[in-house]
Amino acid sequence: MVSAVVGLVFTRALFSQSPVVVLVQVAAVALMAWARLTLTRRSFHPAADVTGGDLVTTGPYRFIRHPIYAAACVFCWAGVLANSAVVPLAAGVLLLIGAVIRIFAEERLLVDRYPGYRNYAKDTKRMVPYVF
């Protein structure tokens, strides 16, 4: 995921001057900030890892299980679609694949750590409400 973002930065395809893209990216940043604030003081782990504490099912986690990954993908894909070219498209696909791999890896850990995770997962989608 980090490689994809770096690739988008170096190809100047992460940002756009389009007001629509800027609005989508601001919304993605707001979602990410809301999710981080909901997690409170839990630490950030570069590797798929489960932090201590109770299962978080409030804030954006009421609607989707992985709002931070969703926000990162929305932010980057807004730039990719605004700067359509082969290299940014490949970076966007790489980012999405990386996010999905991390999601599945984390969910294996979450099922083991939190007995209520399976029930929570039945009621919420991973990244896109009602879809995935």
Image (cartoon, rainbow, N blue to C red):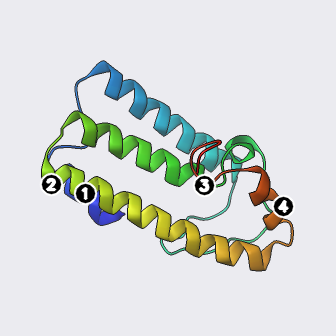
Q: Residues within 10 Å of mark 3 (few under 14, many from 20)?
A: many
> CB under 8 Å between callouts 2 and 1?
yes
Real-space Cα distance between discs 4 and 2? 40 Å
Q: Is residue 10 left or right of residue 21?
A: left
Q: Earlier in the sequence, mark 3 or mark 2?
A: 3
Q: Nearer the viewer, residue 90 or 50?
A: 90
Secondary structure found at label 1: helix
Real-space Cα distance between discs 2 and 1? 6 Å
Q: Nearer the viewer, mark 4 or mark 3?
A: 4
Measuring 65% from the left and 70% from the top, which residue is drawn there? 107
Q: Nearer the viewer, mark 4 or mark 1?
A: 4
Q: Earlier in the sequence, mark 4 or mark 3?
A: 3
Secondary structure found at label 4: helix
- Residue 48, quarter of the rendered image: bottom right
Task: Name the residue carrying label 4.
Answer: 119
Q: Quadrant of the N terminus?
A: bottom left
Q: Is residue 63 left or right of residue 72?
A: right
- Residue 122, quarter of the rendered image: bottom right
Amino acid carrying label 1: it is Ala
Real-space Cα distance between discs 4 and 3? 15 Å
Q: Earlier in the sequence, mark 4 or mark 1?
A: 1
Task: Name the residue carrying label 1.
Answer: 91
Task: Name the residue carrying label 2.
Answer: 87
Amino acid carrying label 4: it is Asn
